[in-house]
Image: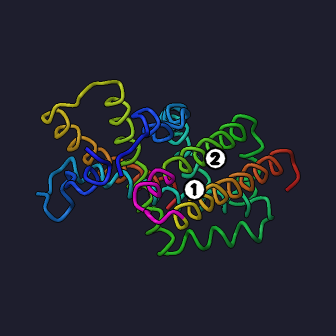
Amino acid sequence: MSSYRTPLARARGLGSAKHGVGTWISERVGGMALVPLTLWGVFAVLRLAAGDYGFAVAWIGEPVNAVLMVLLIAISFWHMQLGLRVVIEDYIEKALSKTALLVLNLFVCGLAGALAVFSILKVAFGGA
Amino acid sequence: MSEAARSSRERPLSPHLQVWRWHLTMFTSIAHRATGIALYVGALIAAAWAVSLAGGPEAYNAFKAVMGSPLGKLVMFGLTVSFFYHLANGVRHLVWDAGQGFDIKSANASSVLVIAFAIAASIAIWVIAGMTGAF
């Protein structure tokens, strides 16, 4: 059957969703923010690993530590949600499996990130 | 040409893993994804740390006991290497995104640099951990 559709009609809907650039840039800008934040995080882990529960509570009670920890957690979960999303989109071909994994990735990052941020704030505000 | 004839024509395929000679830049690309997935697990462990801290001393001590066990330390060492690798290679990607260092010679040289940094920084951090009582 010879097609009566114009080249434009055939091409429509196959292109960019128009928001890929923003996603791509936010993954990189998040990555830039994570360079200093994660390096700070390594030294935070070293100090926390050497201390006990009381030390950790006092440490997270410092405004600078609490804020940097919340930023580290929030930006990390955002960045890794985007990163794993690309891996899923690249390797999982079946539409249903792909969609299920993309939604699971988003939910896991959203839930774990929210739990972590709330927990940090709770301790920082003295509720531990 | 009709659409049916066009779709039956052989399309060019990109060469798959098995028919490629292994090279360093290929390794660094795959390792970036692998370490990213490892760090995903690491971030979930960090979230568990925060939740255990909010849960009180018992929950916090249980978390520390798990992470302080030989298996916990092995996981932490793997995460250390993954972190420093992903950090250095991430910066390398940012340099590429800025349009620099794309030629083969630079890409190979930065591969070596990134791997060397990941190994050296991981060892340095664990030496510091040993000296400060974090180990």
* Residue segment shown in magenta: A84-95
Seen at 43% across and 69% down, the residue is: B74
Horizontal placement of B90 versus A54: left or right? Answer: left
Kindly identify which residue carries mark 1. Answer: B43
Query: B5 left or right of A74?
Result: left
Provide residue A121's location: percent of width, then percent of height.
80, 46
Across and down, in percent, residue B4 comes to 30, 54
Q: Is residue A92 magenta?
A: yes
- The verdict on residue B88 being magenta is no
* Camera-nearest residue between B53 and A73: A73
Magenta stretch, overall SS = helix
Task: Kindly identify the amino acid type of the residue bearing the numbered disc 2.
Answer: Ile
Quadrant in the picture for the C terminus of chain A: bottom right
Residue A120: x %, y % from top left: 75, 50
Q: Closest to the observer: A59 or B118?
A: B118
Q: Is residue A34 above or below residue A106?
A: above
Residue at mark 1: chain = B
Residue located beneath label 2 in the image:
A73
What residue lies at 86% left-to-right and 45% top-to-bottom? A125
Q: Residue at x 21, y 54 (%)?
A: B9
Residue at disc 1, secondary structure: helix
Left or right of B76 in this view: B56: right
Quick check: marks 1 and 2 in contact, CB under 8 Å?
yes
Rendering coords of residue A57 (x, y %): 76, 52
Residue B66: image quadrant is bottom right
Q: Chain of mark 2?
A: A
Judge by depth and name the residue closer to the eye, A123 or A4: A4
Identify which residue, A3 or B112, lies in the foreground. A3
Residue furthest toward the right? A127
Q: Quadrant of residue B34?
A: bottom left
* Residue type beneath disc 1: Ala
Numbered circle sitting on residue A8: none
